[in-house]
Amino acid sequence: MVAADTIAAIATVGAVSAIGVIRVSGDGSIAAADMVFHAASGIKLTDAENRRMYYGELIDADERLIDLCLCTVSRAPGSYTGEDTVEFHCHGSPVVLSEGLRALFSHGVRYAKAGEFTKRAFLNGRMDLTQAEAVIDLIESETPAAAHNAAGQLNGSLGIRLECVYNALLDVMAHFHAVIDYPDEDIDEFEMQGYLSALQSAQEDLSRMLDTYSRGRVLREGVPTAIIGRPNTGKSSLLNALLGYERAIVTHVAGTTRDTIEEKVIIGGILLRLTDTAGLRKTDDAVERLGVDRSLAALRGASLVILVLDGSEPLQTEDFDALRSIPPEVPKLAAVNKSDLPHVLGSDQLSGLGLEYFRVSALTGEGLDALDAEIKRIFPEPEVSQSGELITNARQAESLARARGSVGHAIESVMATVTPDAVLMEVEAALMAIGEITGKTMREDITSRIFERFCVGK
């Protein structure tokens, strides 16, 4: 276990709530907690049973009562951090919790940094780096599928899969080291085929994991979706209809929306990051022109585009301009709005646009089900079990790609019957890349960047 000072932080939301938790960890946590907590039973926390709740008084440095609360002790190494830890379960008043922290600080405890509890868990071997990253993914998950995937990775599923590949490559490396150390011992054809098979199996396993990244990124980050069109077609009204409340200001005046508005909505289990854009048109208004520029920027970063047309009017030049502004590789749909009004825009004109279209009414909600169904078809909800099989972050994907590339080069070297040291160099590079994912190959810049994402108290 890594020796460390004693830290404390509020581990729950920083607002009024029913329950608030103060978390303490470190060698002096139990002794410090004993100074601020008097159990009703009279027991000292140094004698308390592990993971048992005790009722008592939380007091400040002047022996004044702060709260009547519950306290639990978890001793090293069987705690979340791998250190002695204490938790106070108080009434959820921010004042009570801050006073509880102040009392602990008066006894030598310091305020925890962001992610420091989980970082200590990693450093003390309670979890690998994939599990540590899964903690923040679980906290930040915005859909049930994302939560299930993060929970699976927190349970160690990704680390176990990577460990199998790592051990297989480690065996290959050990054999090739032996060959280099004892050059008189030639590798016969049978052994060489065994090494080749092991490397090919490792490459396939790495490819299967890496292939899940595109789905995993959608699962975690959502689908950037731009709602575009010329002014006054009902883009903001459609945004409000999809959200189920009035987020954007809607008027009959063209150009009301002068900046992009971003909101999130779940459709078919998929998180859409909707961006309502300013109407696309040429304008001499400097402010509106800035809005159009931002709309085009949102369009360039979109993975789905919803082109809003006014079904009560014929197609206009600006409609075709908006359509042409969509990158050809980006999926796009046409929402023909104002279906509650007489149809002027006919099916023959719409068919000529070359994209799926749906008649909707942002005012009444008519047709939104069809739009939802088409979005689900383009981005089907991932079939995620509790196995945590989807790679969801770019750091892991980049390291997997490097590992797979190095294994591929090792395979090429074996098949070309080059010297063993060339194979060994590529296998070692693959092991290094896998180790960066799990934390075996620990780099301070990587770990610091990971734990900076965490909130204080976790």
Image (spheres, helix red, strand yellow):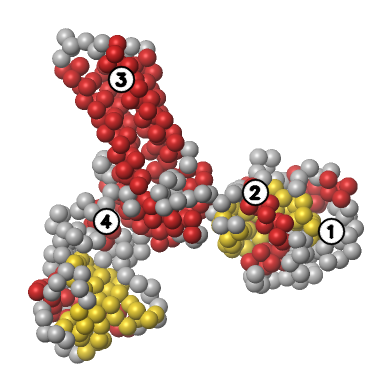
Q: Residue at x 29, y 11 (%)?
A: 189
Q: Which marked residue is nearer to the observer: mark 3 or mark 4? A: 3
Q: Nearest the camera: 363 or 249? A: 363
Q: Mark 3 or 4 closer to N-term?
A: 4
At mark 1, the secondary structure is loop
Query: Which residue is labeled 2 in the image?
Result: 377
Characterize the local packing of mark 3: few (<14), some (14-19) or many (20 or more) Cα atoms within 10 angstroms.
few
Q: Is residue 273 visible?
A: no
> As displayed, is residue 311 above or below residue 110?
above
Q: CA distance from mark 2 to mark 3?
A: 44 Å
Q: Which marked residue is nearer to the observer: mark 1 or mark 3? A: 3
Spot occupied by residue 407 in the image (x, y as percentages of width and height): 36, 27
At mark 2, the secondary structure is helix
Spot occupied by residue 435 in the image (x, y as percentages of width and height): 29, 39
Characterize the local packing of mark 4: few (<14), some (14-19) or many (20 or more) Cα atoms within 10 angstroms.
many
Query: Which residue is labeled 4 in the image?
Result: 119
Q: Amino acid at mark 4?
A: Lys
Spot occupied by residue 306 in the image (x, y as percentages of width and height): 70, 53
Q: CA distance from mark 1 to mark 2?
A: 24 Å
Q: Which marked residue is nearer to the observer: mark 1 or mark 2? A: 2
Q: Mark 1 or 4 closer to N-term?
A: 4
Q: Residue at x 42, y 45 (%)?
A: 389
Which of the numbered marks, if any, corresponds to residue 194?
3
Query: Which residue is labeled 1 in the image?
Result: 311
